[in-house]
Amino acid sequence: MNNLESLTRKYFYYWKNKNVLELSKLLDDEIILQDWENLIIGKEALINFNKDFYKKAGKINLDVISLNYFNKTSFSELKIDIDGVEIIVLDKFIFNEKNFITNIRAFKG
Protein backbone atom coordinates (compact mmCIF):
# COMPACT_ATOMS: atom_id res chain seq x y z
CA MET A 1 0.00 0.00 0.00
CA ASN A 2 1.33 3.41 -0.97
CA ASN A 3 1.95 5.92 1.85
CA LEU A 4 -0.67 8.37 0.49
CA GLU A 5 -3.21 5.58 0.29
CA SER A 6 -2.44 4.58 3.86
CA LEU A 7 -2.71 8.17 5.14
CA THR A 8 -5.96 8.71 3.26
CA ARG A 9 -7.47 5.52 4.70
CA LYS A 10 -6.33 6.56 8.20
CA TYR A 11 -8.10 9.90 7.75
CA PHE A 12 -11.35 8.17 6.85
CA TYR A 13 -11.00 5.67 9.71
CA TYR A 14 -10.43 8.42 12.27
CA TRP A 15 -13.19 10.60 10.79
CA LYS A 16 -15.86 7.91 10.89
CA ASN A 17 -14.83 6.94 14.42
CA LYS A 18 -14.98 10.59 15.58
CA ASN A 19 -11.34 10.52 16.68
CA VAL A 20 -10.35 14.19 16.44
CA LEU A 21 -7.04 13.66 18.28
CA GLU A 22 -5.68 11.22 15.69
CA LEU A 23 -7.36 13.10 12.85
CA SER A 24 -5.58 16.31 13.81
CA LYS A 25 -2.19 14.57 13.53
CA LEU A 26 -2.77 14.13 9.78
CA LEU A 27 -3.56 17.79 9.08
CA ASP A 28 -1.33 20.70 8.17
CA ASP A 29 -1.83 23.80 10.35
CA GLU A 30 -2.96 25.79 7.29
CA ILE A 31 -5.35 23.16 5.88
CA ILE A 32 -8.28 24.27 3.75
CA LEU A 33 -11.43 22.16 3.48
CA GLN A 34 -14.10 23.02 0.97
CA ASP A 35 -17.23 20.97 0.44
CA TRP A 36 -20.65 21.67 -1.06
CA GLU A 37 -21.68 23.74 1.99
CA ASN A 38 -18.55 24.89 3.85
CA LEU A 39 -15.19 26.57 3.48
CA ILE A 40 -12.98 25.99 6.51
CA ILE A 41 -9.48 27.42 6.84
CA GLY A 42 -6.97 26.25 9.42
CA LYS A 43 -6.46 23.12 11.49
CA GLU A 44 -8.07 24.48 14.64
CA ALA A 45 -11.15 25.62 12.73
CA LEU A 46 -11.48 22.22 11.02
CA ILE A 47 -11.12 20.32 14.29
CA ASN A 48 -13.78 22.53 15.91
CA PHE A 49 -16.04 22.04 12.89
CA ASN A 50 -15.69 18.27 13.20
CA LYS A 51 -16.35 18.36 16.96
CA ASP A 52 -19.59 20.29 16.33
CA PHE A 53 -20.55 17.90 13.54
CA TYR A 54 -19.93 14.86 15.76
CA LYS A 55 -22.19 16.28 18.47
CA LYS A 56 -25.08 16.34 15.97
CA ALA A 57 -24.32 13.11 14.09
CA GLY A 58 -25.12 9.73 15.52
CA LYS A 59 -23.81 6.63 13.80
CA ILE A 60 -21.42 7.19 10.90
CA ASN A 61 -20.55 4.50 8.39
CA LEU A 62 -18.05 5.16 5.62
CA ASP A 63 -17.07 2.77 2.84
CA VAL A 64 -14.26 3.54 0.41
CA ILE A 65 -15.54 2.58 -3.04
CA SER A 66 -12.30 3.51 -4.80
CA LEU A 67 -9.06 5.26 -3.91
CA ASN A 68 -6.39 6.43 -6.32
CA TYR A 69 -3.39 8.71 -5.99
CA PHE A 70 -1.00 10.62 -8.18
CA ASN A 71 2.06 12.52 -6.97
CA LYS A 72 0.90 14.22 -3.73
CA THR A 73 -2.85 13.94 -4.38
CA SER A 74 -5.37 11.23 -3.51
CA PHE A 75 -8.86 10.82 -4.95
CA SER A 76 -11.50 8.78 -3.13
CA GLU A 77 -15.06 7.84 -3.94
CA LEU A 78 -16.98 7.20 -0.73
CA LYS A 79 -20.34 5.92 0.38
CA ILE A 80 -21.20 7.66 3.65
CA ASP A 81 -24.19 6.83 5.82
CA ILE A 82 -25.00 9.23 8.65
CA ASP A 83 -27.96 8.26 10.78
CA GLY A 84 -29.51 6.30 7.90
CA VAL A 85 -28.99 8.99 5.24
CA GLU A 86 -26.65 7.79 2.51
CA ILE A 87 -24.61 10.02 0.21
CA ILE A 88 -21.87 9.44 -2.34
CA VAL A 89 -18.87 11.77 -2.01
CA LEU A 90 -15.71 12.33 -4.02
CA ASP A 91 -12.79 13.57 -1.91
CA LYS A 92 -9.58 15.06 -3.23
CA PHE A 93 -6.72 15.36 -0.71
CA ILE A 94 -3.51 17.26 -1.37
CA PHE A 95 -0.48 16.44 0.78
CA ASN A 96 2.62 18.51 1.43
CA GLU A 97 6.24 17.31 1.45
CA LYS A 98 5.85 16.20 5.09
CA ASN A 99 2.74 14.15 4.14
CA PHE A 100 0.31 16.35 6.05
CA ILE A 101 -3.02 17.05 4.36
CA THR A 102 -3.06 20.67 3.17
CA ASN A 103 -6.26 20.72 1.14
CA ILE A 104 -9.50 18.73 1.06
CA ARG A 105 -12.15 19.22 -1.61
CA ALA A 106 -15.32 17.22 -1.22
CA PHE A 107 -17.95 16.87 -3.94
CA LYS A 108 -21.39 15.42 -3.29
CA GLY A 109 -23.18 13.24 -5.80
Image: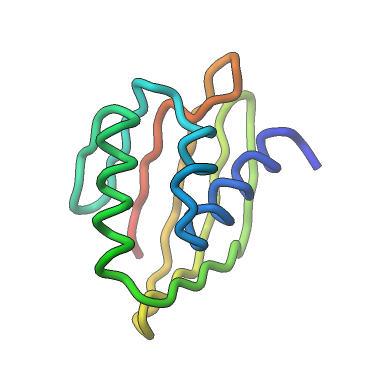
Q: Quadrant of residue 72?
A: top right
Q: Is residue 18 left or right of residue 36?
A: right
Q: Which residue appears at 46% of the width and 37% of the height?
A: 24
Q: Which residue appears at 18% of the width and 53% of the height?
A: 37
Q: How many marks?
A: 0
The coloring applied to the image is: rainbow
How far across and how far down the image is residue 90, in percent? 44, 54
Quarter of the figure with the N terminus: top right
Question: Which residue occupies the foreground of this view, 59 or 71?
Answer: 59
Q: Is residue 24 left or right of residue 68?
A: left
Residue farthest right in this picture: 1
Q: Is residue 62 left or right of residue 33?
A: right
Residue farthest top in this picture: 97
Residue farthest front in this picture: 21
How far across and how far down the image is residue 15, in percent? 48, 54
Q: Is residue 89 left or right of residue 42?
A: right
Q: Which residue appears at 42% of the width and 77% of the height?
A: 59
Give the answer, above or below, for where 95 lies relative to 104: above
How far across and how far down the image is residue 49, in percent? 26, 47
Q: Which residue appears at 27% of the width and 59% of the height?
A: 53
Quarter of the figure with the C terminus: bottom left
How far across and how far down the image is residue 96, in percent? 53, 18
Give the answer, above or below, for where 2 lies relative to 62: above
